[in-house]
Amino acid sequence: MRSRTVVGVSIALMSLTLTACPERIKIGDITRDPARFYHKEVTIAGRVNRSYGALDKGVYEIDDGTGTIWIFTEKYGVPSKDGYIGVTGKLIPGLTYAGKNYATVVHETRRRTHPGN
């Protein structure tokens, strides 16, 4: 009876842990169909190409090999160029002209850095 309880609790904890981790989305998927992700929380990861900021606010661009996207940050400051980073945030609509999307931005709510990558 005790082993069943331990197994049940273990399964429940693993389920909670797995559901708490948002699924990583490829930047190429976002840029191909941004309307599908607008105002939804997305998690992406990639290498920092460019960054501009002051006083813990700014923007930076990341590339995951499928595309690039700009990240707007208000809490964490901008990361250094060539650093590898994971970001979770809400997708903000940008400019659409002649059926092509420009300037889609992720408003950062959480960040995870990966030193050494």
Image (cartoon, rainbow, N blue to C red):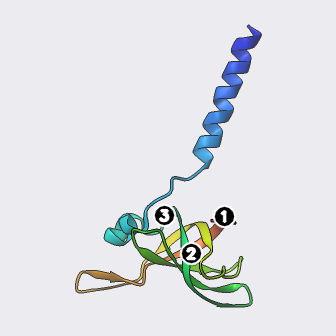
Q: Secondary structure at mark 2?
A: strand
Q: Report, in whole angstroms, how far the alpha carbon at label 3 lies from the one at label 2.
A: 10 Å
Q: Is residue 96 left or right of residue 46?
A: left
Q: Secondary structure at mark 1?
A: loop
Q: Amino acid at mark 2?
A: His
Write down the residue under mark 1.
Answer: 114
Q: Which mark sits nearer the N-terminus, 2 or 1? A: 2
**Among the 4 quarters of the image, the one containing residue 59:** bottom right
**Among the 4 quarters of the image, the one containing residue 53:** bottom right
Q: Tell us which disc is closer to us: 3 or 1.
A: 1
Q: Which mark sits nearer the N-terminus, 3 or 1? A: 3
Label 3 CA crowd tier, 10 Å (few <14, some 14–19, many 20+): few
Image quadrant containing the C terminus: bottom right
**Looking at the picture, how far across and down is residue 46, in whole percent?**
53, 69
Q: Amino acid at mark 3?
A: Lys
Q: Residue at x 32, y 69 (%)?
A: 32
